[in-house]
Image (cartoon, helix red, strand yellow):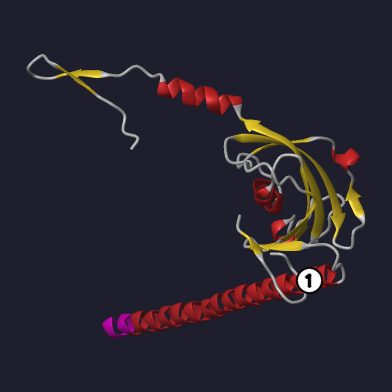
Amino acid sequence: MSYLKLGIFALLFTVLSASCKHHEEARKPISQASGTFMKKSADRNKKLVANEEDVIKKIIKNNPKVKYYATRKGYWLSYDERNPTDTQTPKKGDIAYFNLEIKDIKGKIIYSEADLGPQTYYIDKQDIMIGLRDGIKLMHKNETVTFLFPSHIAYGYHGDNKKIGTNEPLMCTVTLRNFIKDPSVATSTASETTKPVEKIATPANTAKTITEQTSKPITQTKKDTINP
């Protein structure tokens, strides 16, 4: 009887071992497939970006009278109206007021200024198009700039679920009418600087004052870069 039990246990052990081994082997192709998918996806994205950049460069080449600048963020811009006297540009803590027109890369209007209306943007605090978020910070007051954005810094794969399609590069014209300090930020900063100085009693019943520690242009022959 004991030999029979041993035989049954041995058989069960063999079946369980084979099952576990089969389960482990069955999981390996999934991991490999996942890695292959990610690599193919990355390759497709690189090819997409390269193709869009080629299209934009052809547009620039075919418009030699327009002076385009390349930025380190991967988009291009040209000045329709330039303000050479101002040096200030919008930064975090400012509110920007601007007009916007959006076209496809061939220049067909998708959204006109009238469609979109006056725009208000709290710098680096609102979720807007990545390219615009960076581009507005390069502008001076009363300037009009046309940006050429590849899709990955425009609306990407999803588009805007309305008129802008999947992986669509865009031509955006922005007029920066004004920008000011965000009053709420200014109020907060002022209240912090006027905060009363704390005093801590020492064992000898004396007081110590605690102070706060503050502790390019694109041409056929040459390309310049604008540093964001």
* Residue position marked by numbered label 1 in the rendering: 57
Splitting the image into 4 quarters, where does residue 183 fall? top right
Marker count (numbered): 1
Looking at this view, name the residue that lies furthest to the front: 85
Looking at this view, name the residue that lies furthest to the top: 205
At a point 25% along the width and 24% down the height, the residue shown is: 210
Q: Residues within 10 Å of mark 1 (few under 14, many from 20)?
A: some
- Where residue 10 sits: x, y (%)? 35, 83
Q: Is mark 1 on a helix, strand or loop?
A: helix
- Where residue 197 sits: x, y (%)? 30, 19
At a point 84% along the width and 54% down the height, the residue shown is: 164
At a point 56% along the width and 79% down the height, the residue shown is: 32
Splitting the image into 4 quarters, where does residue 21 fall? bottom left
Q: In this view, does 170 lie to the left or right of 14?
A: right
Rendered-image quadrant of the N terminus: bottom left
Viewer-closest of 212 and 9: 212
Viewer-closest of 45 and 195: 195
Viewer-closest of 86 and 117: 86
Viewer-closest of 111 and 222: 222
- Where residue 88 sits: x, y (%)? 62, 41
Q: Give the range drawn in magenta.
A: 1-6
- In magenta segment, residue 31: no
Q: Which amino acid type corresponds to the residue marked 1 in the rendered image?
A: Lys
Q: Is residue 80 left or right of residue 209?
A: right
At a point 32% along the width and 80% down the height, the residue shown is: 5
Relative to 74, say whether 123 is above or below: above
Q: Is the magenta stretch mostly helix, strand or loop?
A: helix
Rendered-image quadrant of the C terminus: bottom right
Looking at this view, name the residue that lies furthest to the right: 108
